[in-house]
């Protein structure tokens, strides 16, 4: 096993911005623009707002999810000072989270199938060819392990955690780890059916919160072994100091009321570290259950540590969320400030803690990024600048 | 670190359980069942190796399964069989890790969800079908049943999914995240997948559905075999893998790779082989292989 993997490159795009720096500007300025989708047409009586990336075009052979991932990858590789040719001599793995990107749910195909119209298999074959990890491996000509995580809303966090494990285990010199998801009518309908979508802009951790807003986007982290980083003289923007993952084993869709799995995931990510956590980038979806459980656990395990949710800026980007928030966590830790938790106005006495209300400076050597997911999955990443 | 296969749970056209697969291996062939596929020319019956989940009632009352779809039932049965094979209880398994794999996911529930939208509009999407349509729904059913509150993840990498799952589970044990991890792959031959098979293969090949679960742990005591290595990558795998010629037992398709590993384990034990390598090289570029050694 080798030391803590370095984060040497970051790339991100979502409704908050077309690049990581643009996203951070939006976060700092408190800008957010949830709107009814321009791409998804539904018959809902209420025009549920979403966080859609405007003007994103992509080749027809790619799913939007894969195209978003490739865009994030280009930015991350450039940030790491890498070109495709540089990867040829390295053991490079790919670990990517998604939900929509692996779903065989092409509407036109399924509708034609149900109508007995004998549809062509093209749409299904397109999904199969667009497995996000496979798209990256194929496009960049990589030879290392290639794996797609479909762990619902914690997929991006888990993908980064597993990618870091590959480096620690000496399996890879470099791993492209992250997540990507596009907006989908089916997913939107599903969350609305579960009655956890806010008909207005979402309000994470607020007393009046009504649910989430869906979003789309992608983020990619270049994780690198210390040996490779030194050889390239690349800067470590941060290191993956810890990863914890634990299941509630409680309910198919609801979190454990005491956050049992989340507590174990956070403790596993922190390891022996007892202090120095500058902030927590919370999952904070804006659903009553998630925010109540998560807010209580953060207050209990990390009292006084500031926390926030960025879903008021990005929407819930599902399989991409953990990766986007990991990228924000690294960038905010590096920059020494955190944003206000957009949408929050009134403390919830049931939570007993409240998120960041303004842009504020933070100090500390590490920061946590959390994800909770359908199925009772919980995942936590600890980033920091400790030397391995 | 050595990682051991301590139990195995399989189901497919051959029946369910390690013994059923061993008996099928002895016979060398299983008569396929059938699947009725709706087409524009009317229903077409194709030969298919189908998995029967009725034995799940041995582990769970029928009432507890009323909201669980076929995909979830196959996972529950495969998981319970592997736990039973390892001599472990169905429940109270604190700290147990869970890695689920599926290349196709819950395609039946996905189509049912879409049906609910097509038939009655967006506002009438079924929340139960939505929950069951997610790739990780099988793990979401299995973890509470087993009380498995250790690390849990679901992976999807086409036919390589089970290899990716074994790769992650082995790493978790090596890292000390869990002492034991239940790993399984599930692939469902739903109506829509039957249609896809018919369109792309006609009657030239027989598809199969099923599940293959393996209970991995650190202890060799009572183990079925050692999981000596798991490798995966992209490009040319280089080393060849064993051809198990197993289509006659459980058909072709995404479920076959997990069942191939299970069959390889049985062959290893029956034939007294020093080792056996099972794997797959995808035409698109992905490859994966596992090396089994006797316990």
Image (cartoon, coloured by chain):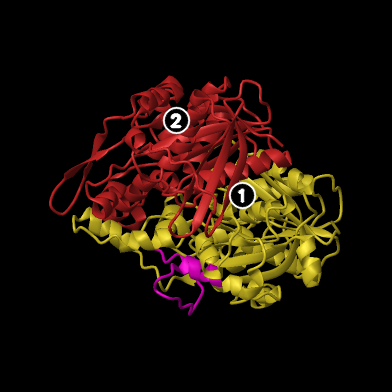
Chain colours: A yellow, B red
Q: Secondary structure at mark 2?
A: strand
Q: Which residue is mark 1?
A: A372
Left or right? Give the position of B210 relative to A166: left
Residue A311 image point, x, y percent? 61, 63
| Chain identity of mark 2 | B
Q: Residue furthest bottom?
A: A55
Whether residue B140 appears in this view of the structure is no
Residue A23: mark: none
* Residue in front for this viewpoint, B67 or B19: B19
Q: Which residue is mark 2?
A: B10
Horizontal side, residue A23 vs residue A4: left or right? left
Q: Is residue A139 above or below residue A373?
A: below
**Residue plotted at (36% across, 68% down):** A41
Q: On screen, B174 above or below B202?
A: above
Badge 1 sits on which subunit? A
Q: Residue at x 33, y 42 (%)?
A: B189
A51 in the magenta segment: yes
Residue A184 pos. (x, y %): 43, 62
Which quarter shows the C terminus of chain B? top right
Circle 2 packing at 10 Å, graded few (<14), some (14-19), many (20+), is many
The quadrant in which residue A262 appears is top right
Name the quarter where the N terminus of chain B is drawn: top right
Same-chain status of marks 1 and 2: no
Magenta segment boundaries in residue numbering = A44-70
SS for callout 1: strand
B27 or A287: nearer the eye? Answer: B27
Q: Give the alpha-carbon distance from disc 1 to disc 2, as whole Å.
A: 31 Å
- The crowding category of the residue bearing disc 1, from other C-alpha atoms within 10 Å (few below 14, some 14 to 19, many at least 20), is many
Q: Position of residue A91 (x, y in %)?
A: 66, 61
């Amino acid at each position: 096993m080798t030391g803590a993997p370095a984060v040497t490159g970051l790339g991100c795009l979502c409704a908050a911005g077309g690049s990581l720096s643009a996203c951070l500007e939006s976060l700092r300025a408190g800008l957010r623009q949830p709107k009814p989708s321009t791409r998804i047409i539904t018959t809902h009586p209420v025009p549920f707002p979403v966080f859609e990336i405007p003007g994103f075009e992509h080749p027809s052979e790619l799913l939007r999810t894969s195209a978003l991932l490739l865009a994030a990858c280009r930015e991350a590789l450039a940030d790491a000072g890498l070109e495709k040719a540089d990867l040829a001599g390295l053991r490079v793995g790919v670990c990517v989270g998604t939900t929509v990107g692996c779903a065989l749910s092409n509407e036109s195909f399924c509708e034609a199938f149900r109508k007995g119209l004998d549809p062509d298999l093209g749409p299904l074959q397109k999904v199969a060819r667009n497995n996000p990890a496979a798209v990256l491996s194929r496009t960049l000509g990589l030879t290392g392990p290639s794996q797609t995580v479909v762990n619902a809303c914690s997929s991006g966090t888990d993908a980064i955690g597993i990618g870091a494990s590959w480096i620690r285990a000496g399996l890879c010199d470099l791993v492209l780890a992250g997540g990507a998801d596009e907006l989908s009518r089916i997913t939107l309908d599903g969350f609305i059916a579960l009655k956890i979508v806010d008909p207005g802009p979402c309000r994470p951790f607020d007393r009046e919160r009504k649910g989430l807003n869906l979003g789309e986007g992608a983020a990619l982290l270049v994780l690198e072994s210390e040996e490779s980083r030194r050889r390239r003289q690349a800067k470590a923007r941060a290191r993956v100091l810890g990863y914890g993952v634990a299941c509630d084993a409680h309910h198919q869709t609801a979190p454990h009321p005491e956050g049992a799995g989340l507590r174990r995931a956070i403790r596993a990510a922190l390891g022996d570290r007892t202090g120095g956590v500058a902030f927590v980038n919370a999952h904070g979806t804006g659903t009553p259950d998630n925010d109540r459980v998560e807010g209580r656990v953060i207050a209990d395990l990390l009292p006084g540590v500031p926390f926030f949710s960025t879903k008021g800026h990005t929407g819930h980007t599902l399989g991409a969320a953990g990766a986007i928030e990991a990228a924000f966590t690294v960038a905010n830790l590096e920059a020494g400030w955190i944003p206000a938790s957009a949408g929050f106005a009134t403390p919830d006495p049931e939570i007993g803690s409240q998120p960041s209300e303004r842009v504020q400076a933070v100090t500390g050597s590490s920061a946590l990024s959390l994800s909770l997911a359908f199925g009772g999955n919980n995942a936590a990443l600890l980033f920091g600048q400790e030397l391995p | 670190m050595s990682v051991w296969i301590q139990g195995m749970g399989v189901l497919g056209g051959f029946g369910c359980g390690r013994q059923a697969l061993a008996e099928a291996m002895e016979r060398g062939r299983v008569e396929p069942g059938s699947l009725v596929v709706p087409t524009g020319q009317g229903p077409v019956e194709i030969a298919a190796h189908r998995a029967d989940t009725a034995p799940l009632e041995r582990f769970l009352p029928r009432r507890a399964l009323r909201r669980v779809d076929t995909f979830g039932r196959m996972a529950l049965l495969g998981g319970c069989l592997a736990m039973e094979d390892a001599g472990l209880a169905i429940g109270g398994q604190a700290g147990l890790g869970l890695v689920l794999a599926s290349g196709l996911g819950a395609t039946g529930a996905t189509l049912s969800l879409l049906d609910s939208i097509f038939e009655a509009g967006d506002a009438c999407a079924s929340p139960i079908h939505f929950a069951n349509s997610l790739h990780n729904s099988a793990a979401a059913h299995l973890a509470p049943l087993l009380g498995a509150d250790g690390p849990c993840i679901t992976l999807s990498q086409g036919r390589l999914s089970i290899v990716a799952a074994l790769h992650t589970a082995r790493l978790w044990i090596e890292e000390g995240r869990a002492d034991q991890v239940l790993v399984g792959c599930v692939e469902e031959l739903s109506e829509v997948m039957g249609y896809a098979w018919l369109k792309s293969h006609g009657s030239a090949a027989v598809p199969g559905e099923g599940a293959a679960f393996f209970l991995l742990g650190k202890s060799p005591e009572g183990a079925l075999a050692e999981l000596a290595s798991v490798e995966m990558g992209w490009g040319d795998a280089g080393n060849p893998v064993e051809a198990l010629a197993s289509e006659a037992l459980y058909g072709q398709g995404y479920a076959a790779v997990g069942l191939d590993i299970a069959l390889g384990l049985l062959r290893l034990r029956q034939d007294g082989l020093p080792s056996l390598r099972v794997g797959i090289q995808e035409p698109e570029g992905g490859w994966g292989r596992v090396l089994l050694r006797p316990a």
